[in-house]
Image (cartoon, rainbow, N blue to C red):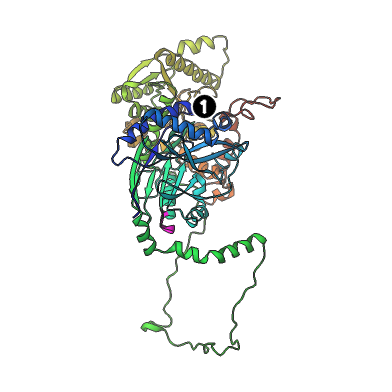
Amino acid sequence: MLQPLPIAVVQLKPRKGDLAGNLARLKMVFTQLEGLSPAPRLVIFPETAFTGYFLEGGVRDVALTAGAMAAALQQAYREALPNGGPVDLIAGFYELWNKTLHNSAICVTVGGDEPVIRHVHRKLFLPTYGLFDEERFVERGHEVRAFDAAGTRIAMLVCEDAWHSVTGMLGALDGAEFVVILAASPGRGLMPAGKDSRMPPTLERWERLARDIAEEHGVFTAIAQLAGTEGGKTFPGGSVIVGPKGDVRAYAPLWEEGIVTSTLEFSDLARARADMPLLKDLQTMLPHLLENSERIRRGTAPELEYDSHGASNSQSPAPLTLVGAAGGRADDDLLPIVHAPALPGGPPPLAIDPLLTTDWLSAFIRDEVERRGFERVIVALSGGVDSAVTTYLSALALGPENVIALRLPYRSSHPDSLHHAQLITDALGIESHTIDISDAVDAFLASEPDVTGHRRGNVMARMRMIALFDQSAKHGALPIGTGNKTERLFGYFTWHADDSPPINPIGDLFKTQVWELARHLGVPEVIVGKAPSADLMQDQTDEGDLGITYLKADQILNWLIFGYRPEEIVRHGFTADEVALVSRRLASTHWKRKLPTVAMVSQSAIGESYLRPVDY
């Protein structure tokens, strides 16, 4: 009789590029696992579990041979449990193999005299689109293979491998009873697809993939996900273990590290495959499918074969005779018609789930502050909705005692700005300081009698950043940014001023989304509802400067950045002038969203050839 298999999926937040430090943490993990009952015989770690994923050129710094990886895991296990028995480990790592670099998964037995490598899978499908650039730094693998370990037969896949249904099929055809997927997939999307879900839509898709592979082939599946943030990209965790009928057996926590355990009962496989014998059907049809696949590969067009009407065959049925309608229905009863919308579906909606958004951005703040060696943050609190939301999120993430608000008025600032900032500090109970920048700005401009309001506003914005970073050094607190996505796409900020703080939790939220989140967080309505203003000049408003409302601007921007042409957007209720205005602002301000342009004269230009992520 097959023995049940206790397993554990370990969801980690590795410190970027710190291979030795991350491996050292395994001693704590192994000790914790040993105390479980039953103790797991198979332990699964995520993709790039001990280095982080987005390393760019840093891959070459941390890549190990499979033998070196196995030896390091054996050492960590023995240091934690000198008398521990054998256990099988599956982990993702950057591999040096055959003089090439790969994103790989290893299965190794540790706890004996020497580690025993059971299999190494090299990732086949390397995402090189959107936020991914994997094929620039690693090579592809070329096969999916099942192998024996932990008393069962396992197939390993790495991240995008699982998005191609053929990979799970190949593992199952090779006898896999358990398909293990290692992933490092950043969350994207602020509106869950499921009514009661509180996870990013991309994570819902991962769960669906695991369930589909399991149910189609009658196998167990597990997805081990990274958690934590890397350069603003947040891995949401949410690892999952799924039974062979597509039933979710266990979830790991969202956003945080954790261990999720389950015991696989292999008698479940026989029941699942009897109830839904899809794998057997596939095995039966495989020769025909392979022949079909080979024909497609050759590009050979098949001949269409069928029997024509009146074919000379004694078994041919007699010609059909059409009679009256069946079931008592009248011959002229019409069928209902459902018309699909004539226009394309469009970009993702701007609506957000405020609770999901709050959890996500709070996790981002916590991780980034800790990763950079700080405990506190300092916010330039203007009295507007953007800085208010940032302050509320910071207080939720770190506790009010770890948030400092800095009010930086100029003599022409609207009186409400100071008052509204005070409302926020009082509501949250956070530390607050006020520095009037009037004397500093006026002293700088004393020799410029003809200074324009625009230039004065730029000096004010940059003076505020001088004060913010100086107070950051004084208080040992990390400066945190407050600019929203609409402002960033419009270039509606002062370069090397508003955009200077090293982290920004709301920079990927449109203004209308910030308003929605503000109301969820409980920001006073007097702040949320007032006309947005940079408050650099008297009677200034954002929408007056921009020439369009945020409500319209956000919708047009959303269409534009997802690749829709102006003439397509006009058909959705916007005027050609409105679309042209937004398009011009977007197209003319790309430079403000980039670091300065540097003349490239070497083979190792920073940011072009020498590539390391911001948090490496």
Quarter of the figure with residue 8: top left
Tell which residue pokes out farthest to the front in this image: 113
Q: Nearer the viewer, residue 432 or 207?
A: 207
Q: Position of residue 561 (x, y in %)?
A: 54, 42
Q: Nearer the viewer, residue 176 or 12?
A: 176
Left or right relative to 160: residue 88: left
| Amino acid bearing label 1 | Tyr
Task: Tell whether 138 sits left or right of 182.
Answer: right
In magenta segment, residue 13: no
Please tell me whether residue 104 is drawn above or below residue 444 in the rendered image.
below
Point out residue 384 in the picture as x, y percentages from the top left corner. 40, 28
> Could you tell me which quadrant the N terminus lies in?
bottom left
Q: Residues within 10 Å of mark 1 (few under 14, many from 20)?
A: some
Residue 366 visible, this angle: no
SS at mark 1?
A: loop
415 versus 520 height, above or below: above
The relative height of residue 298 versus residue 379 in the rendered view (above or below) is: below
Give me the residue at 36% from left, 15% from top: 433
For the residue pair 222 and 55, the one nearer the viewer reads as 222
| Residue 499 can be seen in this image | yes
Please provide the residue range marked out in magenta: 214-218
For the stretch drawn in magenta, the main secondary structure is helix
| Residue 279 on image: x %, y % | 45, 61
Does 258 sit left or right of 75 as displayed?
left
Q: Which residue is mark 1?
A: 616
Q: Find the residue positioned furthest to the right.
A: 601
